[in-house]
Amino acid sequence: MKITICSSAFFARESYELKKKLEEEGHVVFIYPKEVEISGRSVPIEEFYEMRKKELTEGLLEVKARLIEEHIKRIERSDAILVLNLDKKGKEGYIGGNTFMEIAIAFYLGKKIFLWKEPSKDLPYYEEIMTMKPIIIRGDVKKVY
């Protein structure tokens, strides 16, 4: 199965580890790049997200738009998405705005939606997420089918 991993950039390292596990299970896995090009230099994805928190410039918005578009294309090429919704900001099963958008796109495209764990009921869009009938795998990659 072709799977796109969706998550907060905060979980980039864990996403790359999950990619390896899924590939060991025989899946083809798409993921955000480890680095992005900004002003002619390669910047680790985590550093890019820290940069935009400090100052959201037009150039950084353009990079973010390109990343979103490229990830949507990965979702289109996939059979499913797997949302790595670990704990963040005091919320268990954190799903940020960008990841929520990716879930909605996958839903619209008729892709399977897997969640790593139960999403936080405190999320403002918890009801919408659950309406899209995700399959919660509780950390077991063997449940991705």
Image (cartoon, rainbow, N blue to C red):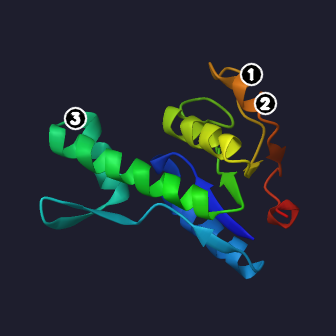
Q: Residue at x 79, y 28 (%)?
A: 131
How far apart are the two marked residues, 2 and 3, measured between alpha carbons? 32 Å
Secondary element under disc 3, as helix, strand or loop, is: loop
Q: Residues within 10 Å of mark 1 (few under 14, many from 20)?
A: few
**Residue placed at 63% from the left, 37% from the top?**
104
Quadrant housing residue 25: bottom right
Image quadrant where one finds the C terminus: bottom right
Give residue 107's position: percent from left, percent from top: 70, 41
The numbered mark at residue 40 is none
Q: Which of 74/83 is in front? A: 74
Q: Earlier in the sequence, mark 2 or mark 3?
A: 3
Q: Position of residue 108 (x, y in %)?
A: 67, 40
Residue wearing tag 3 = 56
Determine contact: label 2, label 1, CB under 8 Å.
Answer: yes
First in sequence: mark 3 vs mark 1 = 3
Q: Residue placed at 33% from the left, 45% from the top? A: 65
- Using the numbered discs, state the Cα–Cα distance from disc 2 to disc 1 in whole angstroms: 5 Å
- Quote the CA–CA distance across marks 3 and 1: 30 Å
> Could you say which disc has been placed on residue 127 in the image?
1
